[in-house]
Image (cartoon, rainbow, N blue to C red):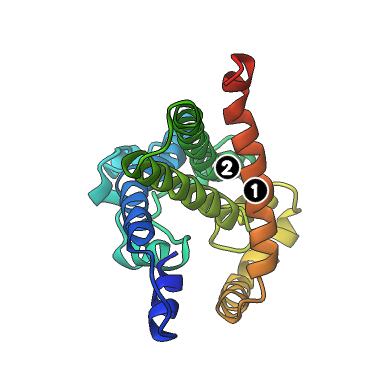
Amino acid sequence: MLINVIQSLSDGRGVDWGQALAQVLSVGFVVLCVLPLHEFAHGWVACKLGDPTAKNAGRLTLNPFKSLDPLGALAILLVGFGWAKPVPVNPRYFKNPKRGMALTALAGPLSNLLAALLGAFLATGLAAGSARHGFNAATYFIFQVLYYYVVVNISLAVFNLVPVPPLDGSRIVGMFLSDRALAAFYKNQQALSFILMILLVSGKLSGPFSMAQQAVANVIFRVAGLPFGLFGL
């Protein structure tokens, strides 16, 4: 994301400012529209499973200012993944706490994947139409915005599925752990989070993350392209 622009400027290389603007616009849309959807999905599933905590706290909403975390939004702009203010969840309301937490956690990344699928469908449709009538500067710029919008959503989904607290993946994995193992897992969450941060900053996870994101992107764009393929577009 924009970290690449900063690196290019520091190295004295040229910068594609149209591409940079497309990234900023796509991230802005994700922060204002998709991150609230991500948190709403958590709260909505929790509410359906019997936990009214998010609803009572006024967090069962798509209002972006209720979930905006400035530092998390900046992280998305710079490196492609970040966070919002998490909705409150109380597992004591669930009949099966571990299952309830897992389903509630899964709702967030799933909302990002659905948002990415919608963006991929629009981008594929634009590309299909432009292939017949020709790309111009405006359609190419819109395509870039949609493309980065899909990339950011996939990045958020993959990042949140990492099984390290406090990410959503840790709640999903928790469903398969014994109570004793789960207690030990969360007892060491600060150390695990610290290790994850070190690996991220050092770039050790860049390769695995890129491979996972590319695999998900391939599936997303294939599914998005199916309707157009049926009509020979």
Q: Residue at image x 50%, y 40%?
A: 116
Q: In the image, is residue 188 above or below residue 1? A: below
Q: Position of residue 146 (x, y in %)?
A: 42, 42
Q: Is residue 166 left or right of residue 51?
A: right
Is any part of residue 183 visible from this angle? no
Amino acid on which the number 1 mark rests in the picture: Ile
Nearest to the observer: residue 175 or residue 123: 123
**Picture disc at residue 210:** none
**Picture disc at residue 172:** 1
Q: In the image, is residue 120 above or below residue 181? A: above
Nearest to the observer: residue 2 or residue 202: 2
Is any part of residue 161 visible from this angle? yes
Mark 2 packing: few (<14 Cα in 10 Å), some, or many (20+)? many
What kind of element bears circle 1? helix
Q: Position of residue 228 (x, y in %)?
A: 57, 21
Residue 60's quadrant in the figure?
Answer: top left
Q: Position of residue 26 (x, y in %)?
A: 36, 50
Given contact means CB atoms under 8 Å apart, are the residues at marks 1 and 2 in contact? yes
**Picture disc at residue 106:** 2
Looking at the rendering, in which quadrant would you find the C terminus? top right
Q: Residue at image x 40%, y 84%?
A: 12
Q: Earlier in the sequence, mark 1 or mark 2?
A: 2
Residue 68's quadrant in the figure?
Answer: bottom left
Q: In the image, is residue 219 above or below residue 2? A: above
Amino acid on which the number 2 mark rests in the picture: Leu
